[in-house]
Amino acid sequence: MAAVLEHFIEGLQQASTLDDLQTCIFDFRDLYEVEHVVYHSVNASGGQYAALTYDNKWVDRYVSEEYERIDPVVMGCYQRFHPVDWRRLDWSGKVSRDFMDEAQQAGVGNQGYTVPIRGPSGQFALFTVSHNASDAKWTRFTEACTRDLILAAHYLNQKALEIERGGTARAASRALSPRERDALTLLALGYSRAQAAESLEISEHTLRVYIEGARYKLGAMNTTHAVALALAQGRLVF
């Protein structure tokens, strides 16, 4: 999938307006052959921007009914830093089930995968792909594409922030120490912080120091962004 991601990033780098990002979203949908793709960002003052492929009727319905108050994806991802497969969220309540039924009728799809993004100054964003697929097919897709989805989410968010700020460039990053690289590598492999600390035979407090150091050097907005940047720059060795 590396070539597919590179093609998307090349197109993204050419974007200069928020309207261009909408085109990039449609390109991503077609490149990865999924039903829908959504990028939604909210800044600290409540300002919002969205680029998506949903039908406008569903978008209007979602906004008018304020479905973000009951959407398990929004509520679940707001409490998490790591990507979320929709199947792992709580859909047991009647309100949640009714919401999902309506979403599926609107063509959203029965499967989804969302990357939460926490940016500077309180910004919060979600990058989502959704599709109609069996559990087995969706598992194969997410296992093959998780890295791409995380990288695409953070590259897209970075581009959106740059456009919003008038094209401010990111400062050059510095070399990671061996321990900083090891810490990010384990997180990229899906280790929890506790598991990573145990594997490195250090305390979780010391692990946090290495992670924060890596974030600072990479100019990352959060830990997931640091992992994504380190992967994209070829800094991690598996």
Image (spheres, rainbow, N blue to C red):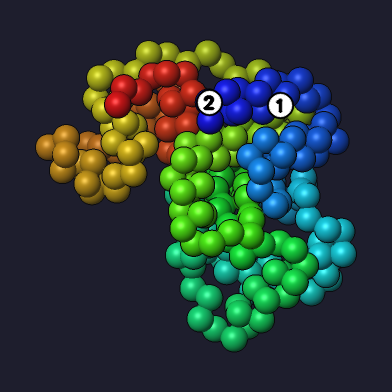
Which label sits on residue 35?
none
Label 2 crowd bin: few (<14), some (14–19), many (20+), radius 10 Å: few
Q: Of all residues shown, which one is farthest toward the bottom?
A: 94
Residue 110 x, y percent position in the rendering: 61, 65
Along the line of sight, which residue is nearer the eye, 32 or 19? Answer: 32
Residue 112 lies in quadrant:
bottom right
Q: Which residue is mark 1?
A: 12
Q: Is residue 205 above or below residue 5?
A: below
Residue 138 x, y percent position in the rendering: 51, 54
Q: Nearer the viewer, mark 2 or mark 1?
A: 2
Please give the name of the residue rendered at 43% of the width and 38% of the height, measured from the top-left corner. 223
Label 1 crowd bin: few (<14), some (14–19), many (20+), radius 10 Å: many
Which label sits on residue 2?
2
Q: Is residue 164 above or below residue 203?
A: above
Q: Amino acid at mark 2?
A: Ala
Along the line of sight, which residue is nearer the eye, 39 or 110? Answer: 110
Q: Is residue 9 above or below residue 70?
A: above
User: Judging from the image, what secondary structure is the residue with disc 1 in?
Assistant: helix
Along the line of sight, which residue is nearer the eye, 94 or 175? Answer: 94
Please give the name of the residue rendered at 75% of the width and 71% of the height, measured from the top-left corner. 105
Q: Amino acid at mark 1?
A: Leu
Q: Is residue 19 left or right of residue 68?
A: right
Q: CA distance from mark 2 to mark 1?
A: 15 Å
| Residue 18 at least partly seen | no
Sequence-first disc among 2 and 1: 2
Along the line of sight, which residue is nearer the eye, 90 or 65? Answer: 90
Please give the name of the residue rendered at 73% of the width and 75% of the height, measured from the top-left corner. 102
| Residue 113 at least partly seen | yes
Residue 238 x, y percent position in the rendering: 30, 26
Residue 224 x, y percent position in the rendering: 45, 39
